[in-house]
Image (cartoon, rainbow, N blue to C red):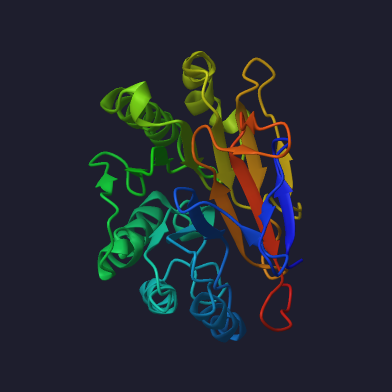
Amino acid sequence: AVGVLVHMGNHQPSKGSGGAMTMSGRDVNFYVLADEPYDFSNVEQLTRELEALPSDAEFVIHLGNANGDAQSQCQEYGFERAAAVLKESPVPVLVIPGDKDWAACGSKKEAEQSLEYWDVNLGKLERNWDHPLKVDYSEDVVGNFAFLHKNVLFISVNIVDAETNPTELSRRLEQNVLWTKSKLAQFTPTEYHAIVIFGHAPPSDKQDGYFSPLIQQIKELQKPVLYLHANSKDGTFEQYTPFEEAENFKAVQLEKRGREAPMRVVVMMEGEEEGEGKKKNEDPFMFERREPTMERTEK
């Protein structure tokens, strides 16, 4: 609901004179969604949601399945339509691929063709806006990007649940590991105080080839790391710790499509103090689940 803030630490948002949540200008504020637009009826609704984004939005992340409509799935026109809708956002939109964008398209040839359609229309969508983000893209895996912004490192990886052939899966997960490690090595630990990783699918045995080689390094970083992923089947919003051995690694699953407006995510600045005890935030991630601008229909 509007104004309902969910946070992973013990901190609480400060309140303005009107009772609204206020944050420092050094915090990162972005909005995240997934699995939309999912049919023609949803196009108008999503357009309104994007046009009505609050003025604090710095960028938007789409966690995949931008072309999940049963009629347009895997078809070029569906990706063109999704791009047209997302371009209505007043701030840059960065997109990663979901299952229905390519991996669930049938044969290897059909999946590769669909991923090409996705890349042409959505792969570097943020270039349609003027913005200060310096986004780097992987040459090895479509959908992988990274950038450093306000001392927060953002990394995306192409991770989906749909079955692909073992060779493709093994190679993609291996390349995802190399991509993530290269970004962790590119910047010194003093250049970032938190890491946000974007993926479509939740951590699971299917994705073990990505998470297992990284989890020890993430633990040793001793920095807060957030993994944001799309909704899994009929799940709901959830925040959890997927690996007991790495308490600094948290995951958040988005609410099911159609129920809420794009969720606000705040990454609070390093060392921010608040409350009577003036305690430093050890976990900087905060989430605001937002009501839609009009009644939405679940499908």
Q: Residue at x 67, y 52 (%)?
A: 14
Which residue: 68% across, 65% down?
20
Q: Quadrant of residue 149?
A: top left
Q: Quadrant of residue 281?
A: top right
Judge whether residue 161 can be spotted in this image.
Answer: no
Please give left or right for residue 52 compared with residue 171 in the image: right
Locate residue 124 relative to residue 228 in the image: left or right. Answer: left
Q: Is residue 283 above or below residue 7?
A: above
Quadrant where the image shows the C terminus: bottom right
Closer to us: 243 or 102: 243
Q: Where is 66 relative to 149, above or below?
A: below
**Residue 80 rendering spot, x and y as whole percentages:** 36, 76
Q: Classify residue 144 as left or right of residue 82.
A: left
The reply, left or right, for residue 14 in relation to residue 179 is right
* Image position of 57 with respect to 181: above or below: below
Is residue 211 at all visible to an observer of this figure? yes
Please state which of residues 244 and 13 is positioned toward the viewer in this rendering. 13
Residue drawn where x is 39% and y is 49% of the image: 108
Question: Which percent across, then down, holds residue 33?
Answer: 56, 61
Q: Please count the marks in the image.
A: 0
**Residue 162 or 11: which is nearer the viewer?**
11
Of 69 and 58, nearer the camera is: 58
Name the outermost residue toward the left: 139
Residue 123 locus on image (x, y percent): 32, 58
Quadrant of the drawing holding the N terminus: bottom right
Percent across and percent down for residue 238 are 74, 45
